[in-house]
Image (cartoon, rainbow, N blue to C red):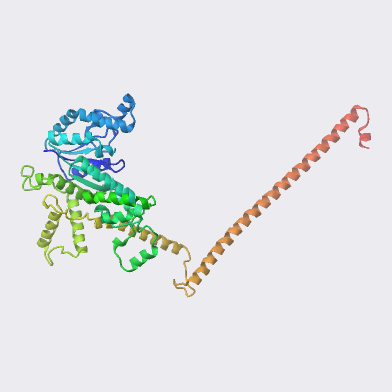
């Protein structure tokens, strides 16, 4: 029974990068028989090793050249052609074996997963004829969450894909590691409001409430000790209009009525983020319930898939740190090596997918507050520390702002006086430099004028000598003595 993932998402959401990261990660976990299938006929140069490539059957470039279609029309034609030649794909999937774990990399055209029927029919045939157990992994660029209107549009897009594909579905906010730099280290709202959207909150945001500057209110809320939930809602890219309030409210009502859309988070380069998503996908698709503890796939009582020691150690340390931060016991108090070893084994067991078959929240790192702390709050702290270091170095290079008594505490008047003194000193230095340039230019001009005058004088004298010689030669020819010519 092949298990696998159907990776969908808008262009630029990180589908191919995720497939490459998943291939490397599952290889590090030593999961056998993992295969990537490229079903994007417009992408013939993938960053991963593909076991099956649709470009061997048909490509967008060939369709555009032969039929004269545009890129989108050629893409739809290619998927319809794949549906008509499904036996080509089925035969190659059977060659991978019944225990294959297959990851399908789909094109980025959203109409394929929202309204075009060919992909849905292909998925149904994969389930029926190939016996595949697939999970749809819908990647969404997390940076879109910084704009309220784009985020609500993505909620509708995810909802439509879930209803259209009719598969076990996971929506994933990819590139969460970019939220820190793009948000300046502080999200408009807690990340939990994005991973588990509250319809009432987004209804107020789209209605334009809380969009005023409100700096005094925000400072009062911070002074009063308000938590992260008091942060100002995200601004919309378009100024809200009152006449659209009813429409916006109805859109949010649609999302709330189905109550299906939620998000996991993903940073492909973070091993713990990838591990949590893999565990969640395996639990949603049922892979863990078939392979964990499988006697046929385990030897000497070992798990069917083992974590590398360094990954297990890192996850154990993070789990211990989380428990300490939450005030939970991290192990038996005062225990020796055996008891510490038992505590470590317990922590590893709690973090291992293959010994934890609960149906609730996947334990360990990965909660919204953990993700926000790692990628957003930590970025703000690092930025503040770097800024403080730069300020310190600048103060060391300069004389620094010092009071009359030599201390570092100055009042506003003294600060202004010292600032004016520094500015005036810089002005004097600049003025002296300009005067020096002017003086040098004047000397250069005078020297050039003197040289020109001397040249003129030399030329005039030369002409006079030449004229005298001409006159003497003329008088000699006329028979007059040279002396008479001189009289």
Q: Is residue 173 left or right of residue 86?
A: right
What residue sits 88% from the left and 32% below the top?
Answer: 472
Residue 92: horizontal and vertical position, in percent? 17, 31
The tally of labels here is 0
Residue 354 higher or lower than 325, as above or below: above
Q: Residue at x 21, y 57 (%)?
A: 318
Left or right of 175, for residue 302: left
Residue 37 percent location from the top left of the image = 21, 35
Q: Name the one closer to the observer, 47 or 286.
A: 286
- Of residues 170 and 336, the one nearer the viewer is 170
Q: Is residue 421 above or below residue 149?
A: below
- Residue at 82%, 35% (x, y): give it: 466
Identify which residue, 121 or 329, lies in the foreground: 121
Q: Quadrant of residue 101?
A: top left
Which quadrant of the structure image shows residue 371? bottom left
Residue 190 at what x, y percent from top left?
28, 57
Residue at image coords 73%, 44%: 452
In this picture, residue 364 sits left or right of residue 426: left
Quick check: 101 left or right of 430? Answer: left
Q: Is residue 142 visible?
A: no
* Quadrant (top left/top right/bottom left/bottom right) for the N terminus: top left
Residue located farthest toward the bottom when viewing the structure as drawn: 405
Residue 433: x percent and y percent? 60, 57
Q: Nearer the viewer, residue 136 or 261?
A: 261
Q: Which quadrant is home to the C terminus?
A: top right
Q: Is residue 90 at least partly visible in the picture?
A: yes
């Amino acid at each position: 029974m092949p298990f696998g993932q159907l990776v969908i998402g808008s262009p630029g959401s990180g589908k191919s990068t995720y497939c490459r990261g998943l291939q490397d990660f599952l290889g590090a976990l030593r999961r056998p028989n993992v295969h990537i299938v490229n079903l994007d006929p417009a992408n013939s140069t993938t960053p991963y090793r593909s076991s099956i490539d649709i470009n061997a059957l048909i490509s967008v470039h060939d369709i555009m050249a032969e039929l004269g279609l545009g890129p989108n029309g050629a893409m739809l034609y290619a998927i319809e052609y794949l549906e008509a030649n499904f036996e080509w794909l089925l035969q190659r999937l059977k060659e991978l074996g019944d225990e294959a774990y297959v990851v399908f990399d789909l094109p980025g055209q959203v109409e394929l997963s929202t309204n075009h029927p060919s992909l849905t029919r292909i998925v149904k045939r994969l389930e029926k004829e190939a016996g595949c157990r697939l999970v749809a992994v819908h990647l969404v660029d997390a940076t879109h969450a910084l704009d309220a209107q784009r985020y609500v549009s993505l909620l509708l897009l995810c909802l439509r894909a879930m209803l259209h594909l009719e598969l076990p579905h996971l929506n994933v906010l990819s590139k969460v590691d970019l939220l820190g730099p793009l948000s300046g280290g502080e999200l408009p709202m807690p990340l939990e409001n994005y991973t588990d959207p509250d319809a009432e909150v987004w209804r107020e945001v789209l209605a334009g409430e809380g969009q005023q500057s409100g700096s005094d209110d925000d400072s009062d809320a911070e002074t009063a000790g308000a938590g992260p939930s008091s942060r100002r809602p995200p601004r919309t890219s378009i100024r809200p209009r009152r006449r659209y309030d009813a429409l916006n409210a109805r859109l949010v009502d649609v999302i709330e009525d189905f109550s299906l859309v939620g998000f996991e988070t993903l940073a492909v380069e973070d091993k713990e983020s990838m591990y949590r998503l893999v565990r969640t996908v395996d639990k949603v698709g049922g892979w863990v319930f078939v392979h964990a503890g499988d006697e046929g796939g385990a030897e000497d009582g070992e798990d069917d898939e083992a974590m590398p020691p360094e990954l297990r150690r890192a996850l154990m340390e993070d789990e211990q740190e989380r428990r300490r931060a939450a005030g939970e016991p991290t192990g038996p108090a005062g225990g020796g090596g055996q008891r510490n070893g038992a505590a470590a084994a317990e922590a590893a067991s709690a973090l291992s997918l293959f010994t934890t078959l609960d149906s609730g929240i996947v334990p360990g790192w990965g909660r919204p507050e953990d993700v926000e702390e790692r990628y957003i709050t930590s970025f703000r702290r690092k930025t503040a520390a770097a800024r403080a270091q730069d300020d310190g170095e600048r103060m060391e290079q300069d004389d620094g702002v010092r009071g009359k008594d030599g201390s570092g505490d100055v009042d506003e008047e003294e600060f202004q006086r010292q600032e004016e003194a520094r500015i005036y000193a810089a002005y004097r230095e600049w003025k002296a430099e300009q005067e020096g340039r002017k003086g040098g230019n004047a000397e250069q001009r005078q020297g050039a004028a003197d040289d020109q005058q001397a040249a003129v004088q030399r030329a005039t004298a030369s002409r006079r000598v030449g004229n005298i010689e001409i006159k003497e030669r003329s008088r000699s020819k006329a028979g007059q003595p040279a002396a008479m010519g001189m009289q």
